[in-house]
Image (cartoon, rainbow, N blue to C red):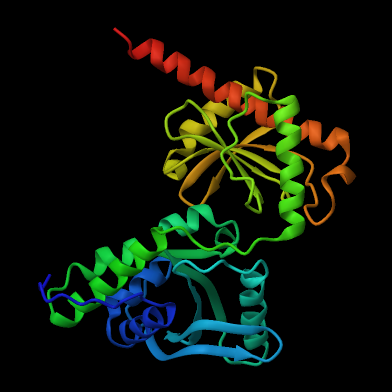
Amino acid sequence: MNNVICNYNNVSEHDMDLMFLQLFSSDEGFVKLFLDKVGIDDPSAKVESVELSKTDPKLGESDIVVLLSVVDKKIALLIEDKIDAIAMPEQPERYIKRGKKAVTKGEYDVFYSFIVCTQKYYDEDKVANKYPYMVSYECIRDYLSGNDSLLYSAYYQLIDQAICKSKSPRHVTLNEKANAFFRKYIEYKNSFYKDLDLRNKPDSNGYWAHYGTRLGEAYIYHKIQEGKVDLTFPGAAQKMAELGLVVEWLREHDHEDVRAEITGKAGVIRFDVPPLNMELPFESSSEADVEICFDRISKLTDIANTFALAAKIATEK
């Protein structure tokens, strides 16, 4: 990489969008990063147009729309770009609706909906996980590092600064109803499950309650409104066969309702639990439903900590 220093002074998503427009317009290798994700390996694929901030009056805005021709089909990539802004809950669904509407109008034959963001953003933001496809900033940075031109050096520094910005604490808009619910949730936890290691701050929305374990980097998410309790193993999406064996063992030992799932690049051991509505007071939740949730969190914590103890014994001299 050329060593000319480029300082973008608080890089914005629009800065990133302009870079992506230029790369889609001129670099077939960059386009291939996206086509590989959807299983398209055709040398005839050709970018016909790139449009930023394409807006539907009723369904909102797509950050980037790339139109390609592949053999006799028109294919669109609909791309949401995120550095650190909070994703709106309905954004992924609106991308799908916009794509379907455009197909109906004959603008293209097939579309694929992406998010481009840092791996950290994708792993931590529950809305980001709803996009069907994802290309990480880190993947793009690695790609750019293979070109020594002055322009690509500037691109590399731009995305590197965006990654640094994404790692900084994000400003979260507090939902008063969700926060009131979560504060009562914490009170319940402290009254009946004091030993659980809840790590969210009381002044957060708490949509995904985060619990620590003693098992390496593994942690637990209680996805309160979605009705899921996940023992999460970062980077384990490539080890689902091994995780499946763990789940088989758990099912043979009185945990019949557990299963293994992939979320982003993580693998999880999951219990389904009753979803709780955080727009309503915590007291309006069914006591039985709340108890089921905390019982499953407690069980997964015990499982993780037991595995951690066994691993410690096995490695001690």
Quarter of the image with the N terminus is bottom left
Q: Is residue 171 above or below residue 251?
A: below
* Rendering coords of residue 269 (x, y %): 58, 35
* Rendering coords of residue 299 (x, y %): 66, 25
The answer to whether residue 90 is left or right of residue 301 is: right
Q: Is residue 183 above or below residue 88?
A: above
* Rendering coords of residue 265 (x, y %): 45, 49
The quarter of the picture where residue 7 lies is bottom left
The answer to whether residue 295 is left or right of residue 260 is: right
The quarter of the picture where residue 289 lies is top right
Q: Is residue 44 above or below residue 296?
A: below
In depth, the one of 16 and 193 nearer the eye is: 193
Quarter of the image with the C terminus is top left
Which residue is the extreme one toward the front? 203
Residue at 18 percent across and 75 percent down: it is: 153
The answer to whether residue 141 is left or right of residue 248 is: left
Residue at 32 percent across and 78 percent down: it is: 43
The quarter of the picture where residue 140 lies is bottom left
In depth, the one of 66 and 75 nearer the eye is: 66
